[in-house]
Amino acid sequence: MPLARRLLRHRPLPGWLMLLAWLVAAPLQASSPIAGPLHSIGSETLASLMLRWGETLEARHPGVRLQLQASGSSTAPPALVAGTSRLGPMSRPMSESERAAFIAAHGYPPLAVPVAMDALAFFVHRDNPVEALSLAQLDAIFSDTRRCGGAAPLERWDELRPTLSGGISRYGRNSASGSHGVVRRLALCGGDFRLDVGELMGSAAVVAAVANDPRGIGYAGLGYLTPGVRALGLVGDDGGAVRPTAEAALAGDYPLSRPLYLYLNLAPGEPWPPLERAFVELVLSAEGQAIVEELGFVALPPGRLTEIRRRLGLEPGH
C-alpha cells in the first residue's frame, strides 16, 4: 500500500466528520430490533389470547419468541416471585397472600394490567332445553355446602325440568385454575365443590366433555363456546335471566363477568424493557383488542384503554 494511503487511513477524522458519523449511527442504534425470548407462565383461559398476541408480535419482530406455559392462574405468582417469568397472565386478581409473597421477594408490588373482560359461563349440551338457572340452583348442582340458599342438592335433570331425565354430569377445572376460584367464590358463595365434579386441565376440555355428554354441565370462559354446547343465562332475584354477553359483562349486569389480567415484574419508576413494552403496547392497541373480540372475549372500551396506557406511561409523550 502506498505511504500516502497508509497515512490517510490512520489519520484521525476531523471533528465535524466524527459528529456526522455519530448522528447517522444514533438512529440506527435507537431503532435496533426487538428480539429475545418472552416468557409467560399462568392462566389457561388466556392461553389462546397470549398465543395470538405472541404470534402477532413475532410477525412484527421476527427475533421475538414467546415461550408460553399455561397451567393455571395460580402458577403465575410463584413464577413471578422466582423470576422464571416476567409475564403472568391471570383470569382473577392476585390474592393478598400472593401479592405479599411477591413484595417480600422483590420489595415492590407486581404491576397489574387489565387486558380484556370475560363472562364465565355455564354450558350444557346443545340438545338440553334448559335456558337459564339461578345461582342457588347452580350451587345446588356443583356444591355440597349449598351456601347460596339451595334446600337440597340437585342430582337429576328432571328436578329442573320434568320432561328431562337422567342424572347430572358435572365438569369443571382443577384448583390451579382462576375459573375454579371465581366459580367457588361467586357461584358457590364461597362453598366447596362436590367430590364428583370432574376436574379437567383446560377450558376447552370442559366444553368438549359437555358437548359429548347430553347430561353434562360445566363452566368455562365464554370465548370457549362451540356449536356443541349452549351457554345458560343466570336468573336474578327479579326472576329475569341475564345472558353471558359482551354487553352484559361490560355493563356489570352479568354476575360472573370478570376482568382478565397480565401481571408483570416491573419496579416502580423502572424503564420498560423493550420486549415487554412492545408486547403490552400491542395488547392495549386496537389490533390487540380486535384479537380479543375475534377469540370470543370482551374487548376493553377505547376510553378505558387510553386510561390504562396513560397510567402505565405508554401513551405518546411518555
Image (cartoon, rainbow, N blue to C red):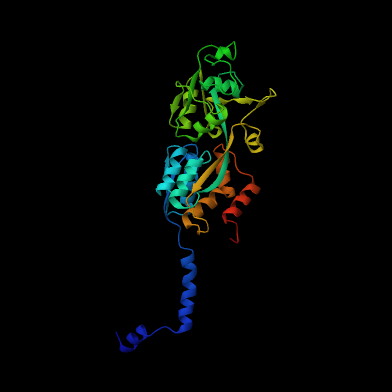
Work out whether 108 lies above or below 138.
Answer: below
Work out whether 145 lies above or below 224.
Answer: above
Q: Is residue 4 left or right of residue 145?
A: left
Q: Is residue 297 left or right of residue 12?
A: right
Q: Position of residue 200 (x, y in %)?
A: 44, 28
Quadrant of the frame with the N terminus: bottom left
| In the foreground, 258 or 195 | 195
Q: Position of residue 82 (x, y in %)?
A: 40, 47
Q: Position of residue 241 (x, y in %)?
A: 66, 25
The image shows a total of numbered marks equal to 0
| In the foreground, 5 or 55 | 55
Residue lying farthest to the left in this orientation:
1
Residue under the image location 54 percent in, 38 percent down = 295
Q: Position of residue 40 (x, y in %)?
A: 44, 45
Quadrant of the frame with the C terminus: bottom right
Work out whether 109 lies above or below 121.
Answer: below
Work out whether 208 lies above or below 162.
Answer: below
Residue lying farthest to the bottom in this orientation:
4
Residue under the image location 49 percent in, 55 percent down = 267
The answer to whether one can see residue 67 in this image is no
Residue under the image location 62 percent in, 33 percent down = 245
The answer to whether one can see residue 47 in this image is yes
Residue under the image location 60 percent in, 50 percent down = 308
